[in-house]
């Protein structure tokens, strides 16, 4: 547990920190795009990228090592207020509800906001103890093509519709008592790790003289 203090100390007390959990397989400009929006629109001091050791719902196949994904994250983040972390290793957690409980325990005076793209708002009812995430931490969701409209009609958005906060109040979200969440109609960024992996596989196939993967 000692490694948690790597991100700890007085620096984080009283800070407003956005948490962007992800596989980052690989990190890309879409992650940076929503992190910069989060810093501004939510009036945050920092965004931590929580590079997941292994998403419980994703296959281990094609998953680069945690070290590679952390290194890629550091190259892409290029911002003094975006911190690339392996917090889930230090906390020994894989499920977001547990990660957030651990972070609130270790950083009781830090105000966290959980950040995610619209695809994850659709998927979150499949996450373990997902209502604890909404009930324990303010949440900010960013539009992402092509998921935004369907996400707003999904189970999570419907269940917490009375606790949705308008964009105009988003700068105060970190201080609101959860459940409280905002959906940003933000400028879209098309980057996707799946597409990047597909393109890399095609380039590798062509380079080795094989047929491009369809
Ligand atoms: N282009 C984007 N626009 C908005 N949100 C994004 C974008 N890319 C990633 N995100 C969000 O960042 C978080 C981490 O994403 P992740 O690392 O899974 O990238 P990904 O591109 O979705 O990967 P994959 O295609 O492998 O599922 C998720 O909440 C995801 O919704
Ligand atoms: O807690 C869960 O059950 C759970 C299931 C799937 C994904 N998550 C988290 O969702 C975040 C986004 O994951 P990903 O792979 O879509 O980038 C990341 O922090 C994962 O650990 C969490």
Image: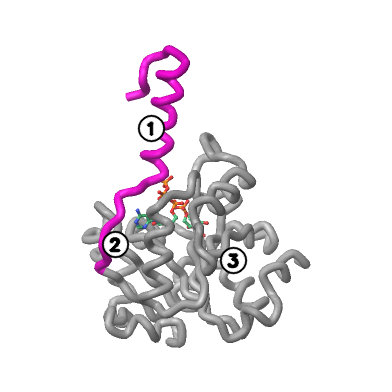
**What residue sits 50% from the left and 58% below the top?**
78
Query: Going 21% across and 61% down the picture, which residue do you hit?
Result: 149
| Furthest-left residue in this view | 149
Residue 193 location, quadrant: top left
Residue 99 disc label: 3
| Mark 2 C-beta closer than 8 Å to ligand 1 | yes
**Pick the front one: 138 or 80:** 80
Q: Is residue 65 left or right of residue 209?
A: right
Q: Residues within 10 Å of mark 3 (few under 14, many from 20)?
A: many
Tell me the residue at 41%/61% (across/down): 124
Q: Name the residue carrying label 2.
A: 143
Whole-number angstrom distance, CA of label 1 to CA of label 3: 32 Å
Q: Which residue was labeled with disc 1? A: 199
CA gap, disc 1 to disc 2?
24 Å
Residue 114 located left or right of residue 171: right
Of label 1 and label 2, which has the lower sequence position?
Answer: 2
From the viewer's perspective, is the residue at label 1 or at label 2 nearer?
A: 1
From which residue to which does the magenta span run?
A: 185-214
Q: Looking at the figure, which quarter contains the N terminus?
A: bottom right
Q: Secondary structure at mark 3?
A: helix
In front: label 3 or label 2: 2
Q: Is mark 3 within 8 Å of ligand 2?
A: yes
Give the percent coordinates (x, y) of residue 114: 46, 70
Residue in the picture at 51% in, 80% down = 16
* Quadrant position of residue 7: bottom right
Locate the C terminus and report the quarter of the image it occupies. top left
- Check residue 69 for magenta coloring: no
Give the crowd class for mark 2: few <14, some 14-19, many >=20 residues within 10 Å: many
Q: Choose the circle earlier in sequence order: 3 or 2.
A: 3
């Amino acid at each position: 547990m000692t490694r948690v203090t790597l991100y700890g100390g007085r620096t984080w007390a009283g800070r407003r920190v956005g948490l962007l959990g992800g596989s980052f397989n690989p990190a890309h400009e879409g992650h940076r795009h929503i992190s910069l929006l989060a810093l501004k629109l939510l009036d945050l001091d920092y965004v931590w990228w929580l590079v997941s050791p292994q998403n419980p719902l994703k296959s281990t196949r094609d998953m680069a090592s945690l070290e590679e994904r952390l290194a890629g994250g550091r190259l892409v983040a290029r911002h003094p207020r975006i911190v690339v972390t392996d917090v889930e290793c230090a906390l020994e957690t894989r499920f977001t509800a547990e990660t957030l409980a651990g972070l609130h325990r270790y950083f009781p005076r830090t105000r966290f906001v959980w950040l995610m793209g619209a695809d994850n708002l659709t998927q979150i009812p499949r996450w373990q103890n997902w209502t604890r995430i909404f009930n324990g931490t303010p949440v900010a969701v960013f539009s992402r093509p092509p998921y935004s409209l369907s996400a707003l009609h999904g189970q999570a958005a419907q269940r917490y519709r009375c606790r949705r906060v308008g964009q105009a109040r988003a700068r105060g979200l970190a201080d609101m008592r959860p459940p409280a969440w905002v959906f940003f109609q933000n400028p879209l960024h098309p980057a996707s790790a799946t597409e990047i992996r597909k393109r890399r596989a095609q380039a590798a196939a062509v380079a080795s003289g094989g047929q491009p993967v369809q």
